[in-house]
């Protein structure tokens, strides 16, 4: 008997013309190109040489693909295919044993002792969709092939707005084999009030029948390593048991408290253990006055983060590592939530485990997007959601369930009245399923508040997709009047990756903006006459007062840098407003990461590296943050935000300077911020005098060029922000020698001290092998700023950092020197 689960061996990937071969016996004559080795079960586009099997201009969806392998088993063995693309069939020894009805549901089969040929046929979705089926009540705007509403499959690779990438045809999740009794369908519920952990599940023999004679051992290991253990007898293939934790420790979202986790395992005597990550927390939704705010452990949570983009199995060699790195980047930037949108791919339990470790809440859409879901598939969609939620039951990161992405918005935007777009599936069936797991539910993203008859697309009620700033090119100031209550998507821009990434994938910045390779990655709504690069250029023109195309023709790299900064400014301004608006419960940027090289929506590029706007957002998203803004005639407003569970006691210092370094106003004010609270001050309250620092009254020349605000705790700087009074349209060229950058050691750690004789905007530290604690910030004239540097693994710490400092106003990059 196996003590651990294994997987299928590698085999051969074969392509055939759609419909030419109906079972494995026909593979001898109609194979295209002879096939290529598939070292492990994976998606077609992850296999070397797969394109050589395709006729010219054929997509991965146009062909039938076959995976063929032989395997030897010593005993009766159960094979579970966790994720096969749709449509697909499984054959054992040339006999069809399983058919895939949904790529989001596993299928399984059993084989006896001996040698077996396992063949999986991944049918052409193009051919499948060509069969006429009843039309929906409305058309989807995402794809041209409306018949896909009947296909339980992803739109990744099929809707161009998600990136010009191959569809994940093949094994998009793993395959496991076991010849021992296995615990399946584990359902875990942790009660934070009583500390009782209820565990239910089934136990299957390798032949797929209930293991009535088995005993299951359930172990719970607390954050300190202490073990609670119990056993459960299996009856009619099922078992139930409970464990009790004395004084359970509460799990909090990132920045609001700690993330203590409990590890649960359930296993038969000789079977592989089934594991769960368990956490104790309460979670409700406050819908007061039509709003939508998550309340965790009795505390309102401001949800900020991004809409998750799946890491395609064919894109990177190590998908789990890539997922973990991207989630870490978001958490390190201060995110508290990721949303898994309908229409793409659900993530697995390991994804939720990482989110639980990092304190990231998960908003889980069902896999529906824009289509009118056929009632014939209601049971399948319900089973998909049940499978997803059971796999992560007990995990504290799962926060919200939604009936899909734009499943309500699409018919509303097409003008259908409520009675013409009613969907019992998302209105009751899926709501009941979420309730069974104790999770908040919304009909769709976006939608009106639960139980409300309000118009479902208003930003000032319920859940919205808000692109007033972004796709609809409204002024950035529009964020103030929009009264966004919760934006499950917002702020979509075509964001250029770093100059190094542009060079790596496109050769030079000159390719940006017009070559077909670059444009392939720029998001564009189907049928529109503009793309999101046009959106970015709109905000470049609005912020800097330049003609983007003219800049691009003369200096393509500056054009891209202006775009990166314009996006960062728009995002930071919007999020700073939402973070300090008590009516706003959260906002999630579209999207977390790109699916292809280029200027996609992602805050992270396709290689897993952060783009420039994420550096700016990390100051706005930080658990403890200082947010500085122009409050008009009220002066400069300073908000000190404290998400943490401990009181914040310190002082806020303000210094306003003009170019050349003269200080025109300064002051210090004591500040005490309660746990999970905030405090607002104005410049005159800090300095004790009126100086018109915001230049709102305009009596004569500007009083100041920049205002630096620093929050210090126990005498040490904790947060810093600089507000530049000079308009962004006022171009400045800072000559060489004006800004100095010197590396030095402080308490055994390297830092870079920056100082400029004039105000410098959007200063960026570029030291390969070193990560700065802050980057892309403003420097007030005459105000030195020390930025700590962290070396990457393998970096020579003793040698110290080498690199340069960039800035939009600098005539040339500044070399980082070594301080004497």
Image: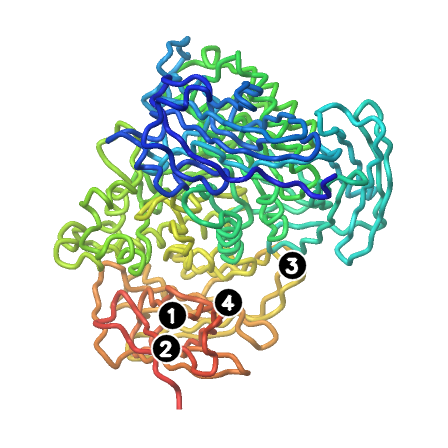
Mark 1 vs mark 4, foreground winner is 1
Q: Is residue 135 above or below residue 343?
A: above
Mark sitting earlier along the chain (1/4): 4
Residue under the point 69% across and 43% down: 4
Residue under the point 47% across and 43% down: 39
Pointer 2 residue? 802
Kind of element beneath mark 2: loop
Viewport quadrant of the C terminus: bottom left
Task: Say which mark, if any, is on residue 473.
Answer: none
Q: Nearer the viewer, residue 737 or 214?
A: 214
Q: Are marks 1 and 2 in contact (CB under 8 Å)?
A: yes
Pointer 4 residue? 719
Separation of marks 1 and 4 at Cα, in angstroms: 25 Å
Is residue 633 among the parts visible in the rendering? yes
Mark 3 vs mark 4, foreground winner is 4
Pointer 3 residue? 674
Pointer 1 residue? 768
Q: Is residue 423 above or below residue 109?
A: above
Give the class, few, some or many, for how many residues have Cα within 10 Å of label 1's Cα (few <14, many ≥20): few
Q: Nearer the viewer, residue 457 or 130?
A: 130
Q: Are marks 1 and 4 in contact (CB under 8 Å)?
A: no
């Amino acid at each position: 008997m196996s003590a651990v689960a294994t997987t299928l061996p590698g085999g051969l990937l074969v392509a055939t013309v759609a419909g030419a071969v109906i079972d494995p016996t026909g593979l001898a004559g109609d194979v295209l190109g002879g096939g290529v080795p598939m070292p492990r079960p994976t998606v077609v586009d992850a296999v070397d040489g797969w394109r050589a099997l395709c006729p010219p201009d054929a997509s991965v969806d146009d062909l039938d693909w076959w995976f063929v392998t032989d395997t030897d088993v010593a005993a009766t063995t159960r094979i579970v295919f966790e994720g096969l693309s749709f449509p697909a069939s499984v054959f054992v020894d040339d006999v069809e044993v399983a058919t895939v009805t949904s790529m989001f549901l596993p299928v399984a089969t059993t084989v006896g002792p001996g040698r077996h040929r396992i063949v999986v046929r991944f049918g052409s979705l193009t051919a499948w969709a060509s069969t006429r089926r009843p039309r929906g009540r409305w058309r989807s705007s995402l794809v041209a092939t409306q018949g896909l509403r009947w296909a339980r499959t992803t739109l990744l690779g099929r809707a161009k707005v998600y990136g010009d990438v191959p569809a994940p045809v093949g094994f998009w999740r793993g395959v496991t084999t076991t010849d021992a009794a296995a615990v399946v369908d584990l359902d875990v519920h942790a009660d934070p009030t009583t500390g009782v952990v209820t565990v239910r599940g089934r136990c299957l023999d390798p032949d797929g029948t209930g293991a009535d004679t088995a005993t299951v051992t359930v172990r719970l290991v607390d954050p300190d390593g202490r073990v609670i253990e119990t056993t459960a007898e299996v009856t009619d293939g099922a078992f139930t048991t409970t464990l009790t934790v004395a004084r359970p420790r509460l799990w909090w979202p990132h920045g609001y408290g700690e993330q203590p986790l409990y590890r649960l395992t359930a296993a038969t005597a000789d079977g592989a253990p089934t594991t769960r990550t368990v956490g104790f927390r309460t979670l409700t939704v406050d819908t007061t006055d039509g709003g939508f705010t998550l309340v965790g452990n009795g505390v309102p949570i401001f949800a900020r983060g991004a809409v998750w983009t799946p890491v395609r199995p064919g894109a990177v060699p190590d998908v789990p590592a890539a997922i973990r790195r991207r989630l870490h980047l978001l958490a390190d930037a201060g995110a508290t939530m990721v949303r898994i949108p309908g229409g793409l791919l659900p993530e697995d339990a390991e994804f939720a485990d990482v989110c639980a470790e990092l304190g990231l809440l998960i908003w889980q859409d069902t896999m529906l997007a824009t289509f009118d879901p056929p009632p014939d598939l209601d049971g399948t969609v319900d089973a998909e959601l049940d499978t997803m939620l059971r796999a992560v039951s007990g995990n504290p990161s799962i926060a919200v369930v939604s009936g899909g992405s734009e499943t309500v918005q699409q018919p509303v935007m097409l003008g259908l009245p409520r009675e013409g777009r009613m969907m019992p599936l998302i209105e009751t069936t899926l709501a009941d399923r979420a309730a069974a797991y104790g999770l908040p539910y919304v009909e769709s993203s976006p939608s009106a508040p639960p139980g409300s008859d309000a118009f479902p697309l208003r930003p000032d009620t319920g859940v919205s997709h808000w692109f007033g700033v972004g796709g609809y090119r409204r002024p950035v100031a529009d964020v103030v009047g929009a009264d966004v209550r919760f934006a499950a998507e917002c702020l979509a821009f075509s964001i250029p990756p770093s100059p190094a990434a542009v060079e790596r994938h496109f050769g030079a910045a000159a390719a940006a903006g017009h070559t077909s390779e670059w444009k392939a990655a720029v998001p564009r709504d189907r049928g529109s006459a503009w793309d999101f690069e046009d959106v970015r250029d709109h905000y470049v023109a609005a912020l800097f007062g330049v003609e983007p195309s003219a800049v691009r023709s003369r200096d393509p790299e500056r054009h891209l840098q202006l775009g990166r900064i314009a996006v960062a400014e728009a995002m930071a301004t919007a999020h700073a407003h939402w973070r300090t608006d008590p009516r706003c419960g959260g906002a999630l940027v579209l999207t977390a990461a790109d699916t292809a090289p280029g200027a996609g929506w992602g805050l992270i590029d396709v290689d897993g590296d952060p783009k420039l706007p994420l550096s700016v957002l990390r100051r706005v998203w930080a658990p403890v943050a200082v947010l500085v803004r122009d409050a008009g005639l009220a002066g400069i407003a300073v908000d000190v935000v404290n998400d943490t569970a401990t009181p914040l006691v310190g002082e806020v210092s303000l210094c306003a300077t003009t170019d050349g370094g003269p200080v025109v106003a300064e002051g210090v004010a004591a500040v005490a911020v309660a746990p999970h609270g905030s405090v607002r001050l104005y410049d005159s309250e800090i300095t004790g005098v009126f100086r018109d620092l915001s230049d709102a009254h305009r009596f004569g020349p500007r009083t100041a060029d920049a205002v630096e605000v620093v929050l210090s705790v126990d005498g040490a700087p904790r947060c810093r922000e600089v507000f530049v009074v000079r308009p962004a349209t006022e171009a400045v060229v800072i000559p060489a020698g004006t800004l100095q950058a010197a590396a030095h050691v402080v308490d055994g750690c390297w830092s870079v001290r920056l100082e400029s004789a004039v105000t410098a905007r959007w200063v960026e530290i570029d030291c390969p092998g070193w990560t700065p604690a802050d980057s892309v910030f403003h420097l007030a004239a005459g105000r030195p700023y020390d930025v700590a540097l962290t070396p990457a693994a393998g970096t020579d710490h003793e040698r110290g950092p080498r690199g340069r400092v960039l800035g939009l106003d600098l005539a040339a990059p500044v070399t980082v020197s070594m301080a004497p």
